[in-house]
Image (cartoon, helix red, strand yellow):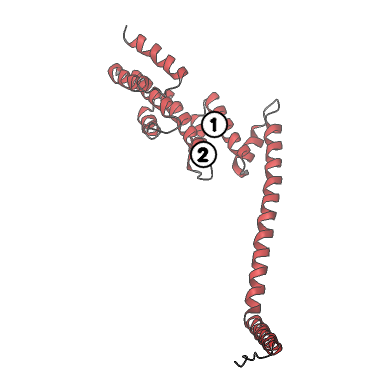
């Protein structure tokens, strides 16, 4: 029997090496072709990414410095005697949480000195500024409704409170309690009891509000 003769393996190795070199050369040529065709787009994209990143970092640094300055201004303004002009400037020009605190402070000051119109404008300004978190906008609405109630503007107050009394809202209990209080002032005790009963039946009503409501119901039942 004649033995099968094998071709030398050296030829296969050389062939494979040659094919790899050809493939690498083609790959390199293709990369050069792509680079020549799209290099300006790639460079422009990298520059854009760098500019955006640098801009965000610069904004954060400036914002942080601005917040620190507004904090200093807020604390300085509250030193005795209170500098209401500085607070007003912070409330008007500031953008941090300290500017929001200044607005609440100025609204309370307006109520204390009998300038309810200024207080109302400050509260409305807070609620209409969507940069403020919803909980602060709702809180401003609640305070405004309470002030309007004391000014006997019951219809306006009830409209505001109705928007705060839905299930799941943070100031629901306070809104329902205050709607009952308005009903008392309008000499509608049965309606007031309905509001109070609605709050009492809610297991999530806070203890403080629950105690006040029970005391009001006792007075109404006399």
**Does residue 210 lie above or below 30 as drawn?**
above
Q: Secondary structure at mark 2?
A: helix
Give the mark, 1 or 2, whose residue is nearer the N terminus: 1
Q: Nearer the viewer, residue 48 or 148?
A: 48
Q: Nearer the viewer, residue 221 or 182?
A: 221
Looking at the image, residue 15 sits to the left or right of residue 168; the answer is right
Q: Looking at the image, which residue is at 65% across and 56% down?
A: 56
Q: Nearer the viewer, residue 54 or 138?
A: 54
Q: Looking at the image, which residue is at 67% across and 29% down?
A: 78
Inter-mark Cα distance, 1 to 2: 10 Å
Q: Residue furthest bottom?
A: 2
C-beta proximity under 8 Å, tags 1 and 2: yes
Kindly identify which residue carries mark 2: 126
Kindly identify which residue carries mark 1: 107
Q: Nearer the viewer, mark 1 or mark 2?
A: 2
Q: Secondary structure at mark 1?
A: helix
Residue 179 horizontal/vertical position (percent): 37, 25
Numbered tag placed on residue 15 in the rendering:
none
Looking at the image, residue 211 sits to the left or right of residue 105; the answer is left
Residue 196 horizontal/vertical position (percent): 35, 19
**Does residue 98 lie above or below 45 as drawn?**
above
Q: Residue furthest left?
A: 190
Q: Looking at the image, which residue is at 28% across and 17% down?
A: 190
Q: Looking at the image, which residue is at 36% across and 30% down?
A: 158
Residue 92 horizontal/vertical position (percent): 60, 42
**Does residue 71 lie above or below 14 as drawn?**
above
């Amino acid at each position: 029997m004649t033995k099968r003769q094998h071709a030398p393996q050296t030829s296969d190795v050389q062939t494979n090496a040659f094919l790899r070199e050809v493939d690498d050369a083609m790959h390199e040529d293709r990369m050069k072709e792509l680079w020549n065709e799209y290099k300006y787009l790639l460079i422009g994209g990298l520059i854009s990414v760098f500019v955006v990143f640098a801009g965000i970092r610069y904004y954060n640094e400036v914002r942080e410095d601005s917040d620190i300055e507004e904090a200093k201004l807020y604390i300085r303004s509250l030193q005795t005697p209170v500098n209401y002009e500085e607070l007003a400037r912070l409330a008007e020009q500031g953008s941090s949480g300290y500017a929001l605190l200044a607005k609440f402070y100025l609204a309370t000051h307006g109520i204390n000195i009998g300038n309810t119109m200024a207080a109302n404008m400050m509260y409305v300004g807070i609620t209409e500024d969507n940069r403020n978190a919803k909980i602060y906008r709702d809180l401003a609405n609640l305070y405004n409704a309470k002030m309007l109630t004391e000014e006997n503007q019951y219809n306006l107050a009830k409209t505001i409170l109705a928007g705060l009394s839905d299930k799941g809202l943070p100031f629901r209990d306070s809104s329902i309690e205050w709607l009952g209080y308005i009903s008392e002032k309008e000499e509608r005790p049965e309606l007031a009891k309905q509001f109070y009963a609605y709050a009492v039946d809610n297991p999530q009503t806070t203890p403080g509000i629950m105690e006040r409501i029970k005391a009001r119901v006792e007075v109404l039942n006399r």
